[in-house]
Image (cartoon, rainbow, N blue to C red):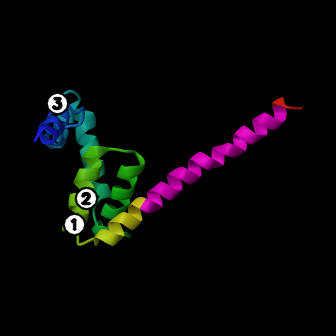
Amino acid sequence: MTNNVNLRKMADNSYFKPEDLKKFGDITKWQETLGKKFFEYYGEVFKEGALTAREKALIALAVSHAVQCPYCIDAYTNTCVTKGAEEEEMMEAVHVAAAIKSGATLVYGVQMMNHNNKISM
């Protein structure tokens, strides 16, 4: 029982609170013009186009993991499920994001090797 109580306390003190996602629309309060423009753009991006809404949701889920946004992860997990994405597809999308992010990190190794070669001469 103590473990559950401690876990609840940790969750209550978390910087990221799931209920804050519902407040996202409030960003227009302090800068209405830019907030409205953002939401117009955001809405346009997620409309059906060359990509289906389901495909866009999977991309958004993968990007959410790459940028490590817990709000986006929750939101796009829900959207993916609503749009009919399978669990395997969702996890595969996350692996694609992980592969790209790790590859992007590793390719900077070339810069490190180049710099090392330069200073070691």
Quarter placement of the N terminus:
top left
Q: Quadrant of residue 83?
A: bottom left
Q: Which residue is mark 3?
A: 29
Residue 117 covered by magenta stretch:
yes
How many C-alpha atoms fall within 10 Å of the one at disc 3: few (<14), some, or many (≥20)?
few
The local secondary structure at tag 3 comes to loop
For image coordinates 51% across by 58% down, the residue present is: 99
Q: Which residue is mark 2?
A: 77
For image coordinates 71% across by 40% down, the residue present is: 111
Q: Is residue 49 visible?
A: no
Whether residue 14 is situated above or below residue 68 in the rendered picture? above
Residue range (magenta): 95-118
For image coordinates 22% across by 66% down, the residue present is: 81
Q: Are marks 2 and 1 in contact (CB under 8 Å)?
A: yes
Whether residue 30 is situated above or below residue 36 in the rendered picture? above
Image location (x, y in percent) of residue 75: 23, 53
Q: Nearer the viewer, mark 3 or mark 1?
A: 1
Q: Is residue 95 left or right of residue 5?
A: right
How many C-alpha atoms fall within 10 Å of the one at disc 1: few (<14), some, or many (≥20)?
some
Of all residues shown, which one is farthest toward the front?
1
